[in-house]
Each structure stands twice: as structure tokens, then as C-alpha cells.
Image (tube, coloured by chain):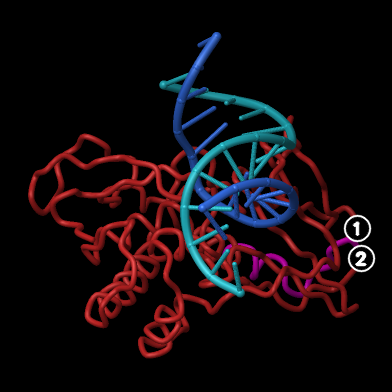
Chain colours: A red, B blue, C cyan
Amino acid sequence: MPELPEVETIVRSLAPSLIGRRLDGRLVTAVRRYGKYILIDTAAGDTLTVHLGMTGRLLLDAPRGPHTRTVFDLDEGAGTLLYDDIRKFGRAVWNSSPPVLGPDPLSITEAEFLDLLRHHRSRIKSLLLDQSFLRGLGNIYTDEALFRAAIHPRARNLSAPRARRLHQAIVEVLQLAIEHRGSSISDYVDSEGRKGTFQLLHRVYGKEGQPCLNCATPIRRTVVAQRGTHYCPKCQRR
DNA sequence: CTTAATGTTCCCCA
DNA sequence: TTGGGGAACATTAA
């Protein structure tokens, strides 16, 4: 469900409501994103670490539902932060550090990105999904970035010009998606229950059979790295 | 009934 | 050592 833009949107919607308030008795000092992880720091030194997996939601002052897994109290009875998760792939636990991941795609420079890419030989889609390579991209934004960069998902050993194009496409698509508050395909909502709108601007993800916006060739769906992969067979070459 | 779904991890094999 | 495939986790919807 949540990739970098969705997690960033949740963090931004959560921060003003949580900072300065008490969460399970601890004063919240910061709400941060680390890749797809949400980190809520407290003055007590404890950090609530949340990964939403595929269907997780963090909701402020929402009613308990059938998939509510944890309820965190705010200010002794003056509100709640709910952790909901249909498929239970996610986690919301105190003081469990996330693993060390690769650089943030919005912070890495073009030169650093090119250098990082040079050290890997695998298919570009697999690489972009690997959180120890770059942190925050998932299946939607990988497909959307590769389309914008006109690179085939199974391409390897990208030339410098193609790698530069890819870096630019990643930054562009992530920033645009954040501006549109993420993509709501099936489950995603922010901490106030609001859906994002970037799904309306997707160019390939979930568009199998529909005409490519550039060349009208039908968008193809295949499987790469065990994930549904959407691309234009004419515009995106290896 | 079967398949696929915004994710991660672990195991096996080349 | 690196990378790829498959399975597992759990639930819902088409």
C-alpha cells in the first residue's frame, strides 16, 4: 500500500497533530520518515516505529474497526492513534529500529546515483525495489519512473545518459506524487482518512491494454522480481 | 475457484 | 559473492 509518497503524506499529516502531545504517556518531539518507515520520536527517548506493510493505516481519532490491531492513547483519553492493518504484514512497535537501508531517492545526487548504479548488475526494476539499494520506492513508482525514463524494467548496466534520465524521472515522479498526496489504489489513506489523487496521473501502473500516452501501443503487463510490471514495449527498451 | 494486490524476508540454486 | 526464483505471511476483491 504505502511507498515513499504515501508515507511522506502520512508523516506530514501526522506531525502537526502529534508533536507536543503525549502518545502512550510520552511527549512526541518529532515525526520522521525513513524509507517506508514512520518514526515517532518522544522526549522519553522511546521511538514508535511503524511499517505499514501492504494494507496498514495510521489513523487519528478514528473509530475502531474490524482490522484495528493497536490503539495508542493520546493525552490520557483525549484522542487515539489507531494502527489498522487488514493483511497484517505491517508493524507498529516501540523501540524496534528499522534495518539500515540505502540512500533516500529524494536526497541522493545524480553523481551519487550513477556511482551506486555502477556497482550493481541486476535488472533495474529489481534494483529499484531493493530497499538496501534505495529506500522508499515500491512497485507503483518503480514502474512509473521507468516509463518516464523510457527504460525497460529488465534493463541492466544502464549507460550514464540513461541513468541520469532515470534519476531525474524518480525525483520527478516522487515529488509529483507527494504534491498529489500519494496514490490511492485500494487501501491507502492518510492519517485523517483522506485519499490521495496521484493514481489519476499514473501512466502505466494498472494500465494493461490501454494505449501508451506517447505512442498508443498497448501497455503490457509482465512479471519482474515477482511483481506485476507495467510498461510500454515500444517506448521502453532494454 | 483462481488470481492478484502499494511489502519484506528467508531459503535454495546457479 | 551476487542474483534470481519461489514460498511464506494474511485478507479481500474481482
Looking at the picture, which amino acid does disc 1 mark? Glu
Are the residues at dot 2 and dot 1 in contact (C-beta closer than 8 Å)? yes
Chain letter behind tag 1? A
Q: How many marks?
A: 2
Secondary structure at badge 1 equals loop
Tell whether position A54 is magenta.
Answer: no
Numbered disc 2: what chain? A
Residue A225 numbered tag? none
Image vertical order of residue A81 relative to residue A162, above or below: above
In the rendered view of the protein, which quadrant contains the C terminus of chain A? Answer: bottom left
Is residue A65 visible in the rendered image? The answer is no
Residue drawn at x 41%, y 82% is: A113
x and y percentages locating residue A5 in the rendered image: 47, 62
Instruction: Tell me, yes or no, if residue A48 can be seen here.
Output: yes
Residue at x-position 88% and y-position 53%: A77
Query: Hey, what amino acid is under mark 2?
Result: Gly
Q: Position of residue A212 (x, y in %)?
A: 15, 47
Q: Which residue is denoted by mark 1 in the rendering?
A: A76
Q: Are marks 2 and 1 on the same chain?
A: yes
Question: Callout 1: few (<14), some (14-19), or many (20+) C-alpha neighbours within 10 Å?
Answer: few
For the record, the magenta segment spans A13-24
Residue A23 magenta-highlighted: yes
The residue lying toward the viewer, choosing from B4 and A12, is: B4
| CA distance separating discs 2 and 1 | 7 Å
